[in-house]
Amino acid sequence: EKFKRLKNEGNDLVKLGEYEEAANKYSECMKLNAEECTVYTNRALCYLKLYKYEEAKRDCDHVLQIEDSNIKAFYRRALAHKGLQVRKNNMAGI
């Protein structure tokens, strides 16, 4: 019950663009149920919006260890890789 409430609060925060707060809600969910993949993919989305690509990639990697065909995890991991690559290229240009 608490898990569901926290997850819904996180989802509402995402809709408002409050990604840091939403990520915190999803992290609280993980303490209650570490095997629920949707909170990891949701938190990965928040991390992508916050330009925290390494953290997003880590969450997606975790999901793919549990569900090796999770499309959201594959897609968001690809976005994280792209963000990391862009950052690396920008750093090389400085």
Image: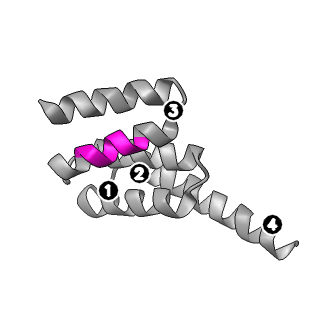
The x, y position of residue 38, in whole percent, is: 30, 42
Rendered residue at 33%/27% (across/down): 9
Confirm whether the magenta stretch covers residue 40.
no
Q: Mark 1 points at which residue?
A: 63
**Can residue 78 be seen in this snapshot?**
yes
**Can residue 33 be seen in this snapshot?**
no
Amino acid type for the residue under numbered disc 2: Ala
What crowding class fits label 2: few (fewer than 14 Cα within 10 Å), some (14-19), or many (20 or more)? many
Residue at the far bottom in the pictured view: 92
Rendered residue at 36%/32% (across/down): 10
Magenta residue span: 23-29
Q: Name the residue under label 4.
A: 90
Amino acid type for the residue under numbered disc 3: Glu
For the residues labelled 2 and 3, say whether their Cβ atoms are less than 8 Å apart: no
Amino acid type for the residue under numbered disc 1: Val
Rendered residue at 47%/60% (across/down): 55
Q: Name the residue under label 2.
A: 73
For the residues labelled 2 and 4, say whether their Cβ atoms are less than 8 Å apart: no
Q: Mark 3 points at which residue?
A: 18
The x, y position of residue 66, in whole percent, is: 24, 59
Mark 4 against mark 1, which lies toward the viewer?
4
Mark 3 against mark 4, which lies toward the viewer?
3
Identify the main secondary structure in magenta: helix
The x, y position of residue 70, in whole percent, is: 34, 49
The answer to whether 73 appears left or right of 17 in the picture is left
Examine the rendered structure and indicate whether residue 29 appears above or below residue 85. above
